[in-house]
Image (spheres, rainbow, N blue to C red):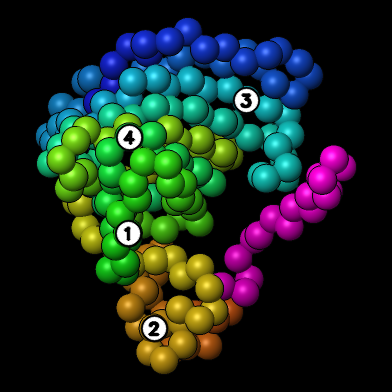
Amino acid sequence: METNRRPIANWKGRGSKTWQGFKPLLVAGGILLLVGVVYAAVPLELYVGTSNHIGLWDGPATLTARTLKTPVGETTGTWHYHPGYVYNVVRSGAITVEDGCGNVQTLNAGQAFETSEGRVHRAYNLGGADAIESNMFVGPPGRPITVQIPNNERRCGPPSRVEECMNGGWASFDFPSSFPNQGLCVDFVRNRRRITLLVPEDPLR
């Protein structure tokens, strides 16, 4: 769980039929007391907007723009996942992302990465300087941008590619549930709802 501070900038979106004005969203600090753990990652900006239709979500969506600071040696939170799409840019420092299946990746300033498809993960700062990242969440209306795994349990999944189910890989997954065999793991991947977004060629290229 992340603590929240007052936004340092007054950034507003343009109003239209599909875009409504962005509004700051501050999460009450009392929630942190209920969890019992406070992490030092601090949102410097947090703005939320809604749209009647976003192609990436193929329908109504909530967009959340966030600037997050993770001090040296701190984590962004417990094991968690994001219900929608998340795109991130490391602006300074470095952030290490570990997913519940054991994959670890360190991203440095100027690098971008995606934390989507409901994959369980956590992130922390192992570098020598505070890490600043910008995040854009695109998700279903009414859902939080982050869902914590109960009791901070490490979970592996869900699988994203058929290849992850092969050669015994299916036995590693336990989120959102485990698989009794490779075939059911493959079926899960192939039957997951996916958006095919057709992007036209750049007309000035």
Q: Report the residue marked by disc 2.
A: 169
Q: Amino acid at mark 3?
A: Thr
Residue type, numbered disc 2: Gly
| Helix, strand or loop status at disc 1 | strand
Q: Quadrant of the C terminus?
A: top right
* Marks 3 and 2, the one that precedes in the sequence: 3
Which residues are drawn in magenta? Answer: 188-205
The residue type indicated by label 1 comes to Gln
Query: Residue 58 lies in what quarter of the image?
Result: top right
Residue 105 has which mark? Answer: 1
Q: Quadrant of residue 38?
A: top left
Question: What residue sits right under mark 4 in the picture?
Answer: 92
**Position of residue 183 measured from the top left corner of the image (x, y, whole percent):** 53, 88
Above or below for 121 versus 136: below
Which-is-in-front pick, marks 4 and 1? 4
Determine the residue positioned at 45% across, 35% down. 135
- Tell me the crowding category of disc 4: few under 14, some 14 to 19, or many 20 or more residues within 10 angstroms, Cα based: some
Q: Is residue 182 above or below residue 109?
A: below
Name the mark nearer the viewer: 2 or 4: 4
How far is mark 4 from mark 3, CA to CA? 29 Å
Which residue in the rendered view is the most extreme toward the bottom? 167
Q: Does residue 20 appear in the picture of this structure? A: yes
Task: Give the distance between the C-alpha atoms of the residues marked 1 and 3, in whole angstroms.
Answer: 31 Å
Mark 3 in CB contact with mark 2 (< 8 angstroms): no
